[in-house]
Amino acid sequence: MPAIDRRNFLKTGAVGALASAAVSTTVLAQSTDAAKGVSAPDSRSGTNSRPPRVTRILAEFIVKTGYQDLPAEARTEGVRTLMNWVGVAVGGSHDETVNRAVTALTPFSGPPQANLLGRTERFDIMNAAFLNGVSSHIFDYDDTHLKTIIHPAGPVVSAILAYSQYRHVSGKDFLNALVLGVETELRIGNAVYPNHYDVGWHITGTCGVFGSAAATGKLMGLSVQQMVWALGLAASQPVGLRESFGSMNKSFNPGRAAANGIFAALLAAQDYTSSDGMIEAKRGWANTISTKQDYREITEGLGTHYESTLNTYKPFACGIVIHPAIDAAIQLRNQYHLTPDQIERIDLRVHPLVIELTGKKTPQIGLEGKFSIYHAVAIAMIDGAAGEKQFSDAKVRDPATIALRDKVNTVIDPAIKPEQVDMTITLKDGRKLHKFIDHAIGSTQVPMTNQQLEKKFSDLTDGILSPSQTRKLMDTCWHVEQLDSAADIALAALP
């Protein structure tokens, strides 16, 4: 198989060059060391004898950035991130995976401090964060930072929503912590992607723990030194391997990252120390788990450019690389009013990464169907949708789905970008229908609207919350900045 350049993976999330180090509005302008770190010609390399002090730079940024410092775009996308996450967390709350985890942990949970979204049980904050993180990721329907394939909200929001039920947190402080936590994990992810991901780490878990620690520590009011320690303790807890994909273990990773981040912040608040350079040190996190360390990705434009504004939301409940093919199938289906009995074959030209990640030809369960481009295209053509209901065990095993799935053929074409697909449908009457997708719905070029997010939310909560409860919960999320207590979000998610 040709080598895969994942640095170009789904560049739909990319903007132009980051703002230069004109960061007078941030703490970076106050740090000579930080400025030197940003401009050092070899700051991208783990061989640098004096790498930038990125652990402290991040800690200073997190501690000193208030809600009023966030640009409007970052606040807006933070609210949309919250909306999407709450919907998928409620939607996944009664999945077998969550049921098993609840059963396993109930006898050992501490005081009932925080709710599980969509359920009536209460757990201690670390177990609640873990379980809500699992619930939000089990459908593979959560938010995605396309440059790194990180699912940012799971580790961060799971942690701070649990903490907000333990200590009073205003809506504005909650949103500020959310944005800063997401920014932290994404910038760290940018610094090591794609090499870190290529060797097998599940980057949502390994980087998500930094976001969780940063966000929780922000709400706890950690000092700069304590935040340095919190990030260091987070660095000691990387979790998640790509081998887990297609199993319950995959959703374990963001859940565990959420709990581990709280753990780190709680210890740091009591002056439990760590190395001051746990991210960048020679034997620290970045050098240990990746062959690439581009620290400029962490420091440049910090406080002026927000990676969190590039977050995207899935219209389809499966691996992101399948989305262009689903989009093409639904568009052709609707345009030509196609039915499965008309179709002779469906041919796809795709990037090699698509087959590497989603090449399961004969999935046996719904979870495997999420990693099968063959199933995804078939079910999109049959149902005109690819929500969670289209990835059930029953749908995967349905004879009609299998029959159409067997007519889907893929050809690897390195000229096709990972965010693209070239689809040709041959009909039994000899007609050929063609669709090329450059940017699928849900990308930064074709983002989901607020109305589409609400429709997704309602579909996910159907059967768990009543329509009136769903409406109240959505309104609570949309107006998070006006909330006196962010705990109202969790309370509104009670069935």
Image (cartoon, rainbow, N blue to C red):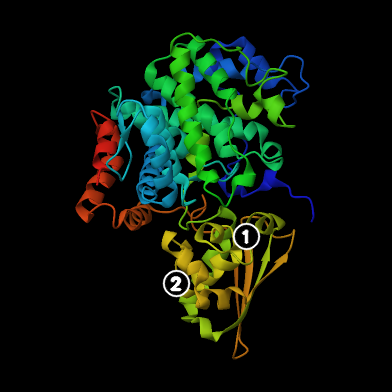
| Helix, strand or loop status at disc 1 | loop
| Helix, strand or loop status at disc 2 | helix
The part of the image, by quadrant, that contains residue 36 is top right
The part of the image, by quadrant, that contains residue 433 is bottom right
Q: Is residue 375 left or right of residue 123?
A: right
x and y percentages locating residue 126 in the rendered image: 41, 28
Of residue 434 and residue 269, the one placed in the foreground of this image is 269
Q: Are marks 2 and 1 in contact (CB under 8 Å)?
A: no
Of residue 152 and residue 337, the one placed in the foreground of this image is 152
Quarter of the image where the N terminus is located = bottom right
Residue 53 sits above or below residue 198 on the image: above
**Identity, as a three-letter code, of the amino acid under mark 2:** Asp
Residue 289 sits above or below residue 102 on the image: above
Q: Earlier in the sequence, mark 2 or mark 1?
A: 2
Of residue 63 and residue 370, the one placed in the foreground of this image is 370
Q: Residue at x 25, y 43 (%)?
A: 494
Circle 1 Cα neighbour tier, 10 Å, few/some/many (<14 / 14–19 / ≥20): many
Q: Which residue is mark 1?
A: 420
x and y percentages locating residue 406 in the rendered image: 62, 75
Residue 383 is tagged as 2
x and y percentages locating residue 56 in the rendered image: 57, 15
Residue at the farthest left position: 468
Q: CA distance from mark 2 to mark 1?
A: 22 Å
Look at discs 2 and 1 and give the one toward the viewer.
2
**Res 77 visible:** no
